[in-house]
Image (cartoon, coloured by chain):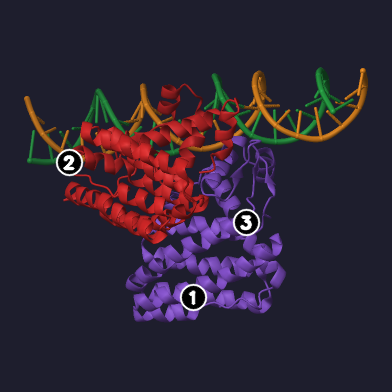
Chain colours: A red, B purple, C orange, D green
Amino acid sequence: MGERALTNKAASGGRAPAHQIVYRALRDRILHGEMAPGQPVTIQGLADSTGAGMTPVREAIRRLTSEGALVFQDNRRVSVPVLDARGAEELIFARQALEPELARRAAATAGPDALARLAAEDAALDRAIARGDVGGYLRHNHGFHAVLYVVARAPVLADLVEGLWLRFGPSLRIVCGRVGTGSLPDRHKEIMDALAAGDGDAAAAAMREDIEQGMAALRAGIAAGEG
Amino acid sequence: MGERALTNKAASGGRAPAHQIVYRALRDRILHGEMAPGQPVTIQGLADSTGAGMTPVREAIRRLTSEGALVFQDNRRVSVPVLDARGAEELIFARQALEPELARRAAATAGPDALARLAAEDAALDRAIARGDVGGYLRHNHGFHAVLYVVARAPVLADLVEGLWLRFGPSLRIVCGRVGTGSLPDRHKEIMDALAAGDGDAAAAAMREDIEQGMAALRAGIAAGEG
DNA sequence: CCTTCCCGAATTTGATCATATTCTTGCGGC
DNA sequence: GCCGCAAGAATATGATCAAATTCGGGAAGG
């Protein structure tokens, strides 16, 4: 999400601005489900907990509201949004509309190093599942897809899809916490095979099934939580 | 983009926060092509021109960078992004992937008032074309689609697509300024007919053609501008 | 006498600004 | 060509003001 500059900056020894640090930290917490849906997010609370001033915190919050990771209530308060069934359906549609294309493009650009990084994320994911580590599952499941987005070299589409993850992250954590990591199969092996073979159609198809399986759990969990 | 609260606030007599006003103003200027691609945007300049302090301006800029309407350069400066051919292709793909679905959903929810608003926007659009008014063309072309997004009652998809408009707005202005408004046909009549008939498939198909026609101009203009 | 409702003060939170600090950059001298 | 200086711009802080929520006291009604 336009963080290339920051990454370069950090890599070259420069110090990142406080608002970037706060943004990153809060973003990761939302993405990995460490904030519950509906939980209020206060500027002063974040400023106290991060040690930053109000202005950088304010900027980080504005950014995340723009991405749908936080919502601006009519009281001017900010909170983690509660995902309803309609919203979940839209997110699933958007993922299915965009991510298979990213997989297709990644099949044309993936090299050995990319495949190795994907395999590493998938292995870490499997270990987290075996351990029953929900946090690790969420982190490495997203990590696998995030590597694929970078490999696809489609920054606009990648930005859009990353925004979708932010919207269902908190709810996915709730759902996974209820059902555990046992019943969460994925199609990552099929995706990697297709990428290795350079078969875009197969990669897109495998991604479609991976999303369908992952989002089916979310859909069911949200329906159960609402009823 | 999550501005429902603000709108209600403003409608009920409350005053909108300065950062919302600045955000809206700058967003509209980008959307309607009043800022050229590559043009720098300085915090102090905006603060001076809008009369607001630096903090609200800062928040507005952060929001727009998150939406891809502005880019954060590695110098910590902010500017209007320059759209290249690859980025344009991604935007076109994303529009084609998402907007037909919005048209399909709008066909199921459009009532007489919605059709009237669409017809009003389209009429204003036709007048702008006849007048050769590029600014009016951009404003009412977006207005037509924006009304449709609201009618579709799919806020997540609408947010995503609105973000796409922000990304190609400045470049579209350049292209339209080069070729004029004469050769810019659209499929708005077909879309409205399909919505009136409640035919989702026809609405989606008409939307696909409308996007194809509008984006073909952008694609050609960008290729010409780069070559 | 107890319960309920309403009103207003205290507290919490958000919004804004003026200012100090840091960073980048461009220029001029060496 | 290189180094340092000065100007412009972004970053960050804390203070100050305004809005909203909460909580507690008191009156009305049962």
Q: Looking at the picture, how far across and down is residue B177, in whole percent?
A: 70, 67
Which residue is nearer to you in this view: A8 or D6?
A: A8
Which residue was labeled with disc 3?
B84
Q: Looking at the picture, how far across and down is residue A19, in whole percent?
A: 52, 31
* Residue A197 - label: none
Q: Relative to B24, say whether B214 is above or below.
A: below
Q: Quadrant of the rendered structure where residue A85 is?
A: bottom left
Query: Is A166 left, or right, of B60 in this rendering?
Result: left
Q: What secondary structure is found at the residue carrying circle 2?
A: helix
Which residue was labeled with disc 1?
B209
Identified at 57% across, 53% down, the residue is B27
Identified by mark 3, the residue type is Asp
Chain letter of the residue carrying label 3: B
* Residue A179 - label: 2
Mark 1 or mark 3: name the one nearer the start of the chain: 3
Identified at 42% across, 50% down, the residue is A161
